[in-house]
Image: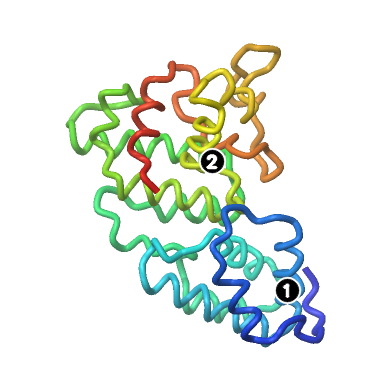
Amino acid sequence: MTTKENKLPHSEEQIIKILRKNYSIITSEIEKVIDEILLNKEGREIIINEITKRSNLNNSNTQIIDGLMYQKIIEIDDQQVIKTLIQKLPNGAINLTKCKYTNYQKLQNLLINKKFKEADKLTQRCLCEIVELNTKSKKSWLYFTDIQFVPKNDLFILDLLWKIYSKGKFGFSVQKKIWINNNKKWDKLWEKIQWLKEGVMKRYPQEFMWTIDAPEGHLPLFNQLRGTQALYYLFNNIEW
């Protein structure tokens, strides 16, 4: 992104209103507005201040748009603004200090940098580690009986990380919404999120998509070759 200074496209009040709106997904039109705001030094400062305020409150205040703005700022050619962002939010847009069972910072770093394939593997590992801590039993994947050992706060954080660094496209809650909208039919869910190829579950990892251009709900994967029971119980634990 260029850092050429343009006239601020909106007033500060209008920008704050845009940034505080609770988007469920970021459209190309919204992203274009953010790009225009970021072309101006004052706009970049407003954006950094807004996402910092929300991060310092609690994670339920973090909006889908925050992750996109964080990603865009660290990609621009302006070392001073990047330095300011890192000083205020050194770890990302989500505050992970209160997570009890595992450290999700590595996952946040991967998602900030859009390394979705590596983030997907780490997400599965994080879920297994949480269950291992609570059951003292080694896990390579999860059975439906294991889902009860995943605290809702950890599931919320994992889901939030995926949503805010994917413009709202990825996450377990996104998959649940698609599932519900298709009358809880698993075959319809697989079809909508494109986990099928010619009616058969795609081969991991080569046939899945690992970019932001993947269909809504395509990521993260979860026990995709091990039936639906575990995912059913995981969906039931999502109350947000």
Cα distance between the residues tagged 2 and 1: 26 Å
State which quarter of the image contains the N terminus.
bottom right
Q: Residue at x 81, y 84 (%)?
A: 6
* First-in-chain label (2 vs 1): 1
> Pointer 2: residues within 10 angstroms few (<14), some, or many (20+)?
few
Q: Residue at x 57, y 53 (%)?
A: 24
Helix, strand or loop at label 1? It is: loop
Q: Is residue 161 visible?
A: yes
Residue 238: x %, y % from top left? 37, 41
Task: Judge left or right: residue 6 versus residue 213.
Answer: right
The image shows residue 99, relative to residue 230, as above or below, that is: below
User: What mark, if any, has residue 90 been given in the picture?
Assistant: none
> Pointer 1: residues within 10 angstroms few (<14), some, or many (20+)?
few
Read off the residue under disc 1: 77
The image shows residue 209, relative to residue 36, as above or below, that is: above
User: What mark, if any, has residue 118 been given in the picture?
Assistant: 2
- Residue 99, picture quadrant: bottom left
Q: Residue at x 55, y 59 (%)?
A: 64
Residue 237: x %, y % from top left? 33, 38
- Residue 127, picture quadrant: top left
Q: Residue at x 42, y 66 (%)?
A: 61
Q: How many marks?
A: 2
Residue 192: x %, y % from top left? 63, 28
Helix, strand or loop at label 2? It is: helix
Front-most of 193 and 70? 193
Amino acid carrying label 2: it is Glu
Q: Is residue 80 visible?
A: no
The image shows residue 160, relative to residue 186, as above or below, that is: below
Amino acid carrying label 1: it is Asp
Coloration of the structure image: rainbow
